[in-house]
Structures are given as C-alpha cells and as structure tokens.
Image (cartoon, grey):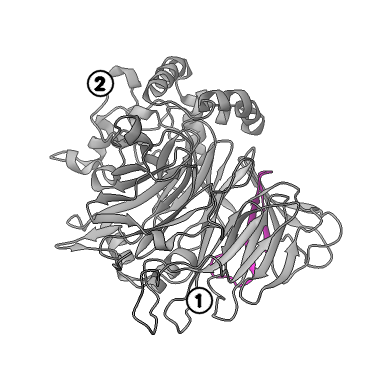
Amino acid sequence: MATEGGGKEMNEIKTQFTTREGLYKLLPHSEYSRPNRVPFNSQGSNPVRVSFVNLNDQSGNGDRLCFNVGRELYFYIYKGVRKVPTRASPGPASGAADLSKPIDKRIYKGTQPTCHDFNHLTATAESVSLLVGFSAGQVQLIDPIKKETSKLFNEERLIDKSRVTCVKWVPGSESLFLVAHASGSMYLYNVEHTCGTTAPHYQLLKQGESFAVHTCKSKSTRNPLLKWTVGEGALNEFAFSPDGKFLACVSQDGFLRVFNFDSVELHGTMRSYFGGLLCVCWSPDGKYIVTGGEDDLVTVWAFGDCRVIARGHGHKSWVSVVAFDPYTTSVEESDPMEFSGSDEDFQDLLHFGRDRANSTQSRLSKRNSAESRPVSVTYRFGSVGQDTQLCLWDLTEDILFPHQPLSRARTHTNVMNATSPPAGSTGNSVTTPGSSAPPPLPRSNSLPHSTVSSAGSKSSVADGAVASGVSKFATLSLHDRKDRHHEKDHKRNHSMGHISSKSSDKLNLVTKTKTDPAKTLGTPLCPRMEDVPLLEPLICKKIAHERLTVLIFLEDCLVTACQEGFICTWGRPGKVVSFNP
C-alpha cells in the first residue's frame, strides 16, 4: 500500500517516483497551463481534459495537445521529453514549452468546454478535426490549425439540453462520432449531416435490459443517426474496444455495460461496489476492462468471462481516470520482452478499428490459450483520483489465472468446484459462503467460469441476482461498510450515503429487483469484497494540490493534469533528455 508518513510527508507533492522499470521524473520544462501560469480557481467548473494528436509532419515533432480550463480551450505544440534542436547550442530552456504562443486559443461565453477528441485518421500537418463538447449540450467541430469552426451540432439544444460528458470519433471513421450526455443518452452523429430545425422524432430500433436504441425518424437523413438511452442517471464515460467492435459505458447508476456497437447487443454488465462509476478503459488486447468510481476502487472485469476478476484499493476518494499503459504491459517467453512497437503502431492499436495482427498482440493472444503455459503476461494500468493521488497497478498471472497454481493432480473442473462459489452463482456444487473458511487470495477461482461465459450471459446474471441470499446481505454489508469507514476518511460525503439517498430509488424504477444492491451483492454482477483478489498499488503518490482529472500513457512519458489547470509530463526511465537548468 502507499507509504504514509507524518502530516508534512502526506502533504508533500512528489516530483518523482520509482517502479521496477526505474525512475519516473516530473519535467518542469514540459508543464502546460494557461499562459499566465496562475492556478485556476476551479470552483464550479468542469474537469480539465487533455487530448493528443500526432500530425506526422516533417519536423519530427508532430505531437499536439489540446486542453480546456474553465471557459478556455488551448491548442499547443507538445514538447514532451524531447528538446527542440536549435541552430545555436541548446540553452537551458530550449526544450521548454512556450505558453505565450498557443497555435489556437478560444474563450467561450455562456458555456464551458467539457471534453474533446481529435480524429487521428484524418490529421495532417495542414488540418486536424477536433470535436469539443460543452456544458450546455452542444458539440463543435473545429480545425485549430486552420483556426476554423466548421460546424456546430445540437446548436439549438433540441436533441439534448444536458452537459456533454464524453465525445469520441468512431474508430476507423472519418465522419461518425459518438456523444454522451449527463441525461444518460448517447447520440451517433455524422459530420456531413445537419441536425434539423425541429426536435427529432424517434422510432425504436432495439430494446434490452436497462437500455434502448432509437433511430431518427425523418424524410431526409439528419442527425442524430441513433439515440442510445443507457441506464439511469448520467452516462459518465464510454470507451471503444481496441478493435472498435465493442463499446463500454459507465453510468451514475453504478453499472458497466458493454455493447456490441454494430449489432447493438448487450454483451455483459457489472455493478460497482457502491456509488456511480466515473471512468472506464480497455486493455490493449481488449481482454480486460478497468473501471473506477465513487467506491474509491478500481475494478478489473474480464471481457470473455463477463466477470469481476479483481478490485484495487489505494485511493481515498473517487477515482476519476483509469488507463492501461501499453508500453509497460509485458509478455515474457524465455526472455522478458517489453511491449514493443512504434508510436504509430500504438495509435493504430488504441484508436483505430483496423487489422491489429502485430507481434505483441499475437503473443498476448497466445498466452491466453491453454497450450502455451510458459508465456507470462503482466498488464500495467494507472489511476488518478480526487484525492490528488496517482496509483500504478500490475495485473499479474496469479490474478488473471488463479486456478493454475492449485491444479496439482486435480482437473480444472474439480478445482472450480473445490471452493465455495458466492451465493447466487450457478456452479455445479453451490454451497453457502459461510459454510467454510474463505480460500486464500487470489479468490477469483471461487467464481466458476460457467457462470457468465458468453455474450448471452444476461439470464445467468439475472438468475444469480434472484437466487442470492438476501438475508445474508445486511450483516455482510454492514461489516463491509464498517471496515471501509475505518480504512479511510472521505474528502466528500461518504459514498454509501450518497448512493442510498439519491440513486437507489431511481435504480428500482429501471429494472425493478434485478439491480437492487441487496440482490446483486454476492452475485457475478457484483461479487463480495472477500470473493475476489484485492490488488494493492505498486505506487500511490500525491502529485497535485487539486483533484486529478487526466492520465495518459505515451511512449516516452505519462501525462497528468489537475483541476488547477496544470498539465504535467513525467519522463519514463531512460527517456529523459538531460540538460542543465
């Protein structure tokens, strides 16, 4: 767990930290903020967000970044860990970011930018398409290189009046983009189409448990092409899978829902321990999803089995961003092999729905087949939170494949039935959780693979929810709450109070008893804390004065940002270009 010393040490902002790879160092010359470098008074404003794009220009430094602070939006050349070569001998500040010269700067009146996304597919040195979502519900398409504003979507707020929470280009598309709102709705747009002068009329396309998808009913094609209504409360974030085929959404009702994007089918669901889920990300190979939220936990969910395989406890307040680090995710055969590839390869991997038959991914796939036991894999991911802390986590063999060390002379099936499945699971030999001592960590082998093993697993999850031992919930739940109260002090109202007073009543309206927390706890939808391994962070460091809102892993650095409007670059071990200040 994180090292916690006295008061002075607790409040000290870290400028470097060490992991097994070596030393990560904060690079002051690569700090970005508003030009005056004055901390932004963030009261009542939307989270600071950062977007990157590479323009592949001839200068060798095609990286650009965009960030929002309050009512302002900035577009800069991103220096990163590199120093820009000059004709004279490099001086002390030759690599420093010149904040007085943004490529583009915009100040908005009456609304604030909330999120943004570059189209990596169409970006060139002369032109780049940037989508910007706003607090009043509009979405703007701008070109910060040409300094043009080409289109405004939902201009009259006829489609949705609520805040835009997330906007992303559809992977592999030059014209389609998806927008999520605080209303709980998502809309699919085409930049080539108009929005119309009247409120859209919809007709139902598909409906499922806690979601519905409508098409726009009009004589001529207009935006939005589709309207998704997902869960109850705000839809806080969504993320496309690396192959672009699946969409993971996290909502204020505490649910992760994973859809097949093209067929509009629900693949699987997971519920937070309590409170809303705020952030979501995919592993580079698309096999795992990590979420974070108001339960202060990071939760790892296996895409193939549709089940929680681990939770991580390191934050003392809400988790605002989770992200995998594809450059430190390692696959080992006879010799350790780092996740290798060019920057462009990883842009393909993370942003586009193209063919991804690269060597590392095939090694990852090979590792997950039963025949290749000697290959081992470690996934690295990170999280930042409102507690101003950065945590790094490793997802290792013993968590991913917990039955392997126990196999000895028993078959796979026997191992699965040897331990007690949680109440409500559909294993072959179901026993009550209290009938035997809990097995040693990792405990995820107490969740039989057969419980939720396919895309059509909704019924088994629902059956498990109905069959769960409700009478046992009260005592276990109170015990868990008591422990969590002792473990940490919240900076906000305690999340248990938050969920019970606001969200649970609404939850019951959506799916009746199926999503009642008392009915889902102890099922594959939301395993009890003792039924899955609890990860501890590799490092947990206070790196800012204000809550953290950004975590992005790049090839030679990682980037964080806080609500004061400071975007910080942390050089990876061995990647920092040294110069004398």
Measured along the vertical axis of the image, is residue 40 above or below residue 341?
above
> Residue at 54% of width from left, 26% of height from top?
493
Callout 1, which amino acid? Leu
> Residue at 74% of width from left, 64% of height from top?
152
> Label 1 near label 2: C-beta < 8 Å?
no
- Give the residues in magenta: 169-189
Counting from the top left corner in percent of width and height, residue 52 is at 50, 65
On the picture, is 144 further left or further right than 78? right
Image quarter for residue 216?
Answer: bottom right
Which label sits on residue 437? 2
On the picture, is 473 further left or further right than 212? left
Tell me if I can see residue 169 in this picture: no
On the picture, is 130 further left or further right than 389? right
Callout 2, which amino acid? Ala
On the picture, is 502 further left or further right than 8? right
Label 1: state its secondary structure: loop
Quarter of the rendering occupied by the C terminus: bottom left
Q: Is residue 188 magenta?
A: yes
Measured along the vertical axis of the image, is residue 572 above or below residue 267?
below
Residue named by callout 1: 55
Image quarter for residue 481?
Answer: top left
Q: Is residue 95 magenta?
A: no
Counting from the top left corner in percent of width and height, residue 17 is at 29, 49
